[in-house]
């Protein structure tokens, strides 16, 4: 029901690319341009500054982006509340979540969902990203939440939360004196890594490759299959590990762990919902709408 032009603006403002916005919205690039021009005429201001093929938001554009985000959050809440009023929400929802999400992100939202829909039974399976994708393909779960970069055919990937992977060590680890290291320092550090098939490892390997560092160049001390094991190991050693920022918030707050910056290395990713292409499982749709209305924002 909301003005589609605001949706077009919001998409362009986030992507800063007219072509990508057109592809995402399934409209033509001239149509995107027309919608933006109509908004600029209506508000009598420029929303984007153009420099060749690159664009950036003007002050007015930044202001409009802020308010469209607020508007769309209200619309999501409204649509969700109205859509569930007449739903007889019962049954079992089979969820699969990769390790980091299952341990540090999902529990709060599962509790909120259960409070709102007490008649829905949730069965959660956790494992690494590859395992969760396999469960989905084998129809053993209805919906997955993963953290990797892989893109399999027949699976629809929808980003829902941004994450950052950081280099961590125990606060008592004094093997290095600097809080910022260089890429040439990495091979000298005793590293704990996740197992093959882990979405976190996949993202780290891809990020290192971009800066011409191979996993085989690292001094890998041990391979462990979850963040809790890695954190426990770090707290009793002078080793280092790449971990999701979500997984170390408690240890940072308790002054047990520290983050070491690597100059020239920035590892960011999205967590993804995954469903099979064409899947219209009603409880999966309900869970997705619920999550979207509870502040998981892009």
Image: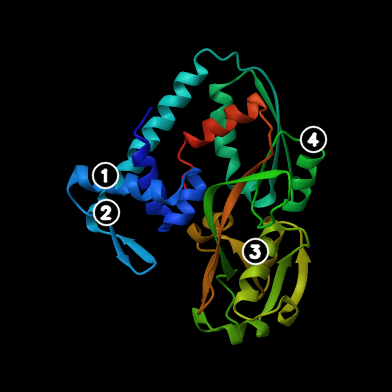
- Work out whether 151 lies above or below 276: below
Classify mark 2: residues with Cα within 10 Å, few (<14), some (14-19) or many (20+).
many
Confirm or deny contact between disc 3 and disc 1 (CB under 8 A).
no
Residue 46, quarter of the rendered image? bottom left
Classify mark 3: residues with Cα within 10 Å, few (<14), some (14-19) or many (20+).
some
Q: Is residue 164 left or right of residue 276?
A: left
Give the structural element (helix, strand or loop) at label 3.
helix
Q: Which residue is mark 4?
A: 139
Q: Which residue is mark 1?
A: 39
Q: Which residue is mark 3?
A: 203
Of the residues under marks 4 and 2, which one precedes in the sequence?
Answer: 2
Q: Residue at x 51, y 43 (%)?
A: 26
x, y percentage for residue 215? Answer: 72, 76
Give the structural element (helix, strand or loop) at label 2.
loop
Of the residues under marks 3 and 1, which one precedes in the sequence?
Answer: 1
Of the residues under marks 4 and 1, which one precedes in the sequence?
Answer: 1
Q: What is the C-alpha distance between the residues marked 4 and 1?
A: 45 Å
Of the residues under marks 2 and 3, which one precedes in the sequence?
Answer: 2
Give the structural element (helix, strand or loop) at label 1.
helix
Give the structural element (helix, strand or loop) at label 4.
loop
Confirm or deny contact between disc 2 and disc 1 (CB under 8 A).
yes
x, y percentage for residue 230? Answer: 69, 62
Q: What is the C-alpha distance between the residues marked 2 and 1?
A: 9 Å
- Name the quarter where the N terminus is drawn: top left
Q: Is residue 245 left or right of residue 40?
A: right
């Amino acid at each position: 029901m909301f003005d589609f032009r605001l949706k077009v603006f919001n998409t362009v403002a986030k992507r800063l690319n007219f072509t990508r916005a057109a592809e995402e919205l399934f409209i033509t690039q001239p149509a995107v341009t027309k919608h933006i021009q109509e908004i600029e005429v209506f508000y009598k201001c420029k929303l984007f500054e153009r420099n060749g093929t690159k664009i950036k938001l003007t002050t007015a554009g930044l202001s409009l982006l802020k308010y469209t985000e607020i508007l769309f959050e209200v619309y999501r809440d409204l649509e969700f509340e109205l859509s569930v009023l007449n739903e007889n929400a019962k049954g079992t929802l089979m969820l699969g979540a990769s390790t980091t999400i299952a341990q540090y992100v999902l529990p709060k939202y599962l509790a909120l969902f259960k409070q709102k829909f007490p008649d829905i039974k949730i069965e959660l399976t956790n494992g690494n990203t590859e395992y969760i994708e396999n469960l989905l393909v084998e129809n053993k779960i209805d919906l997955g939440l993963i953290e990797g970069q892989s893109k399999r055919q027949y699976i629809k990937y929808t980003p829902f939360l941004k994450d950052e992977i950081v280099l961590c060590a125990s606060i008592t680890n004094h093997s290095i004196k600097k809080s910022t290291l260089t890429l040439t320092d990495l091979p000298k550090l005793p590293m704990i890594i996740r197992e093959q098939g882990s979405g976190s490892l996949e993202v780290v390997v891809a990020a290192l490759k971009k800066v011409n560092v191979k996993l085989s160049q690292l001094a890998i001390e041990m391979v462990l299959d979850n963040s809790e094991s890695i954190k426990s190991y770090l707290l009793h050693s002078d080793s280092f590990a790449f971990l999701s920022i979500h997984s170390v918030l408690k240890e940072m707050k308790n002054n047990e762990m520290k983050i070491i910056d690597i100059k020239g290395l920035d590892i960011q990713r999205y967590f993804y919902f995954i469903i099979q292409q064409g899947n219209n499982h009603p409880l999966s749709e309900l869970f997705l709408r619920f999550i979207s209305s509870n502040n998981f924002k892009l």
